Image (cartoon, rainbow, N blue to C red):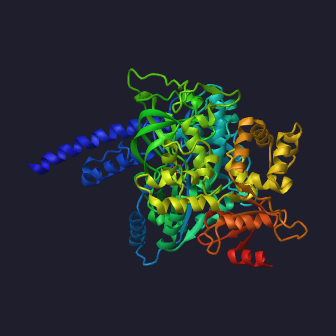
Amino acid sequence: MDDLFSSEEDKKEIERLRTEINYHNKRYHEEDTPEIADSDFDALFKRLQKLEEKHPQLITPDSPTQMVGATPSNKRQVVKHHQPMLSLANAFADDDIDDFIERIKRYLGTEQTPELVAEYKIDGLSCSLLYEGGKLVQALTRGDGQQGEDITANVKTIGTIPHQLHGDNVPNSVDVRGEIYMTRTDFDSLNERQATAGGKIFANPRNAAAGSIRQLDAAIAGQRPLRLFAYSMGESNVNFNTHSEQLDALVKWGFEIVPDVKIFTDSKTLLDWYKTLVKARFELPFAIDGIVYKVNDRQLQSRLGTVARAPRWAIAHKFPAEQAATKLLGIDTQVGRTGVVTPVARLEPVYVGGVTVSNATLHNEDYIAERDIRVGDMVFIERAGEVIPKVVSVILNKRADGTQKYLFPKQCPACGNELVRIDGEAAYRCLNHFACPAQLEASLLHFVGRQQFDIEGLGDKMVKMLLEKGFIKTPADIFTLHQHRDTLVELEGYGEKSIDTLLATIEQCKKISFQRFIAALGIPMVGNQVAVLLGNRWGSLEDLRAVARSDKGQHQIEEIDGIGPRIAESLHDFFIHPRNDEQVQSLLAAGVVVEDFIRPTTDKITKFTGKTVVLTGTLNQMTRDEAKHHLQQMGAKVSSSISAKTDFVIAGDKAGSKLKKAEQLGVTVLGEDDLLNIIGS
Ligand code: IVH
């Protein structure tokens, strides 16, 4: 009886899951407005697969586990694929990959792991491109795998898709498959343009690419920055022995293929590559949601064949989700050290990008208004790598009745002062400066931070206490704290020893380098790197102050290579403001000594003079900051990202994707020892 009962329950559950999955398939594939995160969809799918495995007699041909994608929309012509467009089985855990390899070996009756090609799984939409006599004649979406929508006109607007194949061995007729995608930067600019025009904001590059290709007007699709990576082809009169050979041919014919393709013969190195990419993927210019492993040998591929909707010879190893859906419980505002007021989303905690997230940024008033984000909404949030989580979009058809448009506060949440929105800026600011407790606290924490005065012992807690008790009202007060020693040692929880240590540390920190001092002032857009450029030109605080305050100063500052007009303006504005000038003078009066800038020995031309250098990996014999300082002293420009303009990469231990990119670009790579030798020479 029990069994019968649970079967009945399972049957109902199967039906429920099918309806739900079909619904989400439609939202994702046809409408480009998903309601649940990919990972939640995968979980539903997996649950259905499990139940169907338990009751194989309940599998029907129209179950989503047996089909690919969604029924094509009837807005366009629907065309049958020459060969079905398959989907891929998904794997999430390392064990799933070991099982995949074991299954292949068992099936082929071999002990040896066959060569596996590992390709990025591009997060876009798949497309089939039919070439007759080398000419592009038809492009179809995947649709339900059997038939897809005709998107030829739109596809012809994509620059990276050849209209004519060139090179040798072009088949009479061939079906090239690939992924249409949008780079992350193109996606951001598209969303910005959409926001300005009051158009639809896309949650991620995939939705943006899919929404663009689905435009009925090819002229609009043509304005969208779409690209394609080719990753396979159907049968043709030209034979290839391996998948790698097919990829090589695709390049020769004029396609861009998925970059960084690797071949593995054991699961350990393959899984190491996966682990590297879990982190490094965010440095790629496009979004990937996993790695696809494919058996390289095409004969083995045909022996392995296909089950239901996916080949047995390939699998997608998915990454932990970057996006998740959750409820927006409230919107708070935070005041930063420059007075900018940032809205912060308070969320129902949700697991995304490998951590549980309960706060996310909402950027500014416009960002909220463009997306009409309301308290109580279900929203998508995104956490890509180390980046601060952000709310990307609202799931509109889950909006409850009675929600209200969000109104940005008109008063500073910390001091009550009227907020102003400066012309040309999206941010609201509180102009109350140090009279606003939030700005004072944030400025002080910046002032004593590692890259600035670096006063150990003046952490969050201590700064808060000193502010609350009124010992500090401006940064200069830090240096006269010793006058309050007797009161401070009486405070509960501190005691003589810790207070004396702190006061001694403060005393030692009074002497500071030019660049650290300039960075400590908290001038918008002016950090240590800009300070070094300024130091190189003017050398002392007095000289810089005189130039920045003068009428022609802004122009002179702008002439420095690496400093733009906005930074120059920011410096000028800071130094001419009497309040800031007073702050600098009171720091000097309190005993702060700003050393003159030590210029690199310009008469000595070093290996690094005028060169752009990138540091990556872990250094053992010096900190990153020290290495950077030495390099700058030798005339180098230290940059954080690698491009064709990079001259050297200094790679420490565990250097990852930057090192890889350097190698690809042919940039000279040096080790820590090389750097030490050059410093010592
Ligand atoms: S091969 C039979 N390779 O992933 C094998 N697919 O979940 C068919 N995708 O429909 C696919 N990058 O849209 C393959 N390097 C890659 C891919 C890739 C992205 C997509 C493709 C496919 C889906 C399956």
Where does the image place residue 220, in percent across and percent down from the top left? 67, 30
**Image quarter of residue 508:** bottom right
Q: Nearer the viewer, residue 478 or 554?
A: 478
Camera-side residue of 582 and 233: 582
Please tell me how many numbered marks the rendered image carries.
0
Q: Position of residue 510 (x, y in %)?
A: 67, 57
Residue 506: quarter of image: bottom right
Q: Quadrant of residue 104?
A: bottom left
Work out whether residue 388 can be spotted: yes
How far across and down, in percent of the image, does residue 643 sit? Answer: 74, 58
The residue lying at 51 percent from left, 56 percent from top is: 290
Q: Locate residue 435 relative to residue 250 in the image: left or right.
A: left
Residue 24: x and y in percent read 41, 38
Viewer-proximal residue among 200 and 42: 200
Reply above or below: 588 against 110: above
Q: Residue at x 81, y 55 (%)?
A: 535
| In-image side of 604 versus 265 (left or right) | right
Quadrant housing the C terminus? bottom right
Q: Is residue 612 left or right of residue 40?
A: right
Q: Residue at x 88, y 71 (%)?
A: 604
Given the current orientation, which residue lies at the most extreme left position? Answer: 1
Residue 71 visible: no
